Amino acid sequence: MKKTCPVCKSTYEDFRKRGRFGCSECYETFSAEILTLISNIQGSLQHKGKTPHTDSKQMQNVRRVAQLRRDLERAVAEERFEDAARLRDEITEIEAKMAA
């Protein structure tokens, strides 16, 4: 038996044919199918956005430093001080390259 929306009685196949849902409840009813479809099309469920071509290296460095700082905080909280020192050194190195 095909799953149908309890409000508008649309099926997922109806959505595939028309390219739109029949009502707002369809999003909840077919959420698993929607997530699978998005994952297949985009390759991921997490939005990564686009980076400007002119500043892509600079933005990559900014994002990398932000991630390293989060990792550093976690390492210190978990008392992994050797990892924390390595992360601190990597942050310092990247920031020095960015300033040059």
Image (spheres, grey):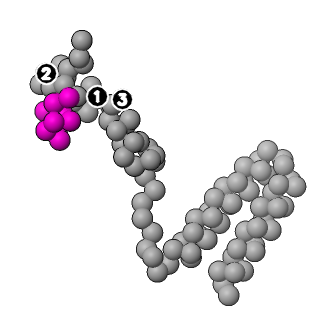
**Residue 69 visible in image:** yes
Q: Is residue 81 above or below residue 53?
A: above
* Type of the residue with mark 2: Lys
* Type of the residue with mark 3: Ala
Q: Is residue 99 above or below residue 20?
A: below
What residue range appears in magenta?
13-22
The quarter holding residue 52 reads bottom left
Query: Circle 3 sits in a helix, a strand or a loop, which is it?
Result: helix
Magenta segment main secondary structure: helix
* Residue under numbered circle 3: 32
Whether label 3 touches label 1, CB < 8 Å: yes
Query: Circle 2 sits in a helix, a strand or a loop, which is it?
Result: loop
- Decide whether residue 2 is among the magenta residues: no
Whether label 1 touches label 2, CB < 8 Å: no
* Residue under numbered circle 1: 30
**Residue 24 visible in image:** no
Q: Closer to the N terminus: mark 2 or mark 3?
A: 2
At horizontal 74% and vertical 56% (from top left) the residue drawn is 72
Q: Is residue 52 left or right of residue 84?
A: left
Q: Is residue 53 above or below residue 83?
A: below
What x and y, as percent, mark residue 23?
15, 33
Q: Closer to the N terminus: mark 1 or mark 2?
A: 2
